[in-house]
Image (spheres, helix red, strand yellow):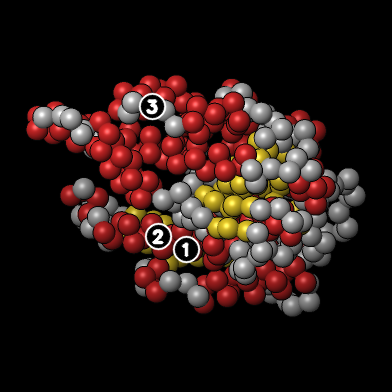
Amino acid sequence: MAHLADPTMTTVVLVSRPERAALREAERTRGELAELGVSNLRLALNGVFVAEVAGDAIADAMTARGQEALAQMPAGLAALPTSETPLMALGTVGLDALRMLSKGTTSTPAQMGALEPIDLPGSLDPLIDEIAASGHGLVMTMGKGGVGKTTVAAHIAVELARRGHKVTLSTTDPAAHVHYAVAEDIPGLTVTRIDPVEELATYREEVMAKAGANLDPSGHAMLEEDLRSPCTEEIAIFRAFARTVDEGAGQFVVLDTAPTGHTILLLDAAESYHREVLRTQTEMPESVKALLPRLRDPAFTHAIIVTLAEATPVHEAERLQKDLVRAGIKPFAWVINQSLLASGTAHPLLMQRGAQERGFIEQVRFGLASRCVLIPWGSVGLTQ
């Protein structure tokens, strides 16, 4: 910590896109680092886009949205020394692209003709209808950070509620952006979150009350020390996750999962948690006993993988799907979010970026997904 807090030794660069959610997450990180005494920070804004000429609806909307997000940037973040990298015409994979990135400039691509037609996957509505037909259960949106899991989860939750179902929208993501994604009160919809701090405190109190009630001072001290171990927090979150999933027995639960893969680690190590719970408590909650069978039941759980039509998000989503299958969970569908190819833009740079999406869309649609949805950039509520 001394080395990390020493500005002569360490510089921390926070990287963000010019989007509200990304900047909120960067500010949360800045605040946590400041509490630890790490203050030598820089902000790198990546993918900054300003249309040179107005007139294209998508380019104009992207420009306005980015400028609005930057204007509303949290004060602590705005005070940091900042660099900007413009939106690249090409992806940042390969030496040529990295050289362009390092220069901080991008060449405007030549004017493109109309893109070749592609049979694009449909909208979210048929998926939501199929989920709604089951009457209850769990919907989990999963994927890399920044792909739009939260807004997809919020959209599904809102639409299920508007179809007359009782719905709880919750999250295991520490950033907890779900309350930003739902901007109004929707009848039948409840927004919650799994708070690690609260869950850990509640779990420790319960264990001390049950397992520590009849211990002598020495045994009591040993139990307190045991409850300070890192696995205790994981158990507390695991139990809260199981309790949230349990609500799906009588309604819908839409869960926006953390981008770290923490949920998958919990599922993969379920038996270890079971043994730990049994060691510290006399009985296991019924919700924990029922958790894995429910997650593996395709009639109860609809796991939706959210990605972007770019190399890294698709690669990580593919690995995520393999982890799910290994845990006995078959993904219900893939959602490819923020597609420029499907947006209808005529802006040259955005068209070139859209043209690069084609291979990734086809890889997901024909090689990875049993069901596939493509959301155009600019769809209301589904890009931030």
- Asked if disc 1 and disc 2 are in contact, CB closer than 8 Å, the reply is yes
First along the sequence among labels 3 and 1:
1
The alpha-carbon separation of the residues under discs 3 and 1 comes to: 41 Å
Query: At which x and y percent is residue 244?
Result: 52, 43
First along the sequence among labels 3 and 2:
2
Residue at figure coordinates x 74%, y 78% from the top left: 54
2 sits left or right of 185 in the view: left
126 sits left or right of 13 in the view: right
Residue at figure coordinates x 58%, y 46% from the top left: 255
Residue topped by disc 1: 24
Q: Which residue occupies the foreground of this view, 301 or 361?
A: 301
The alpha-carbon separation of the residues under discs 3 and 2 comes to: 38 Å
Q: Callout 1 environment at 10 Å: few (<14), some (14 to 19), or many (20+)?
A: some
Query: At which x and y percent is residue 119?
Result: 88, 45
Residue topped by disc 3: 283
Residue topped by disc 2: 28
Give the residue type that dot 3 points to: Glu
Mark 2: secondary structure? helix
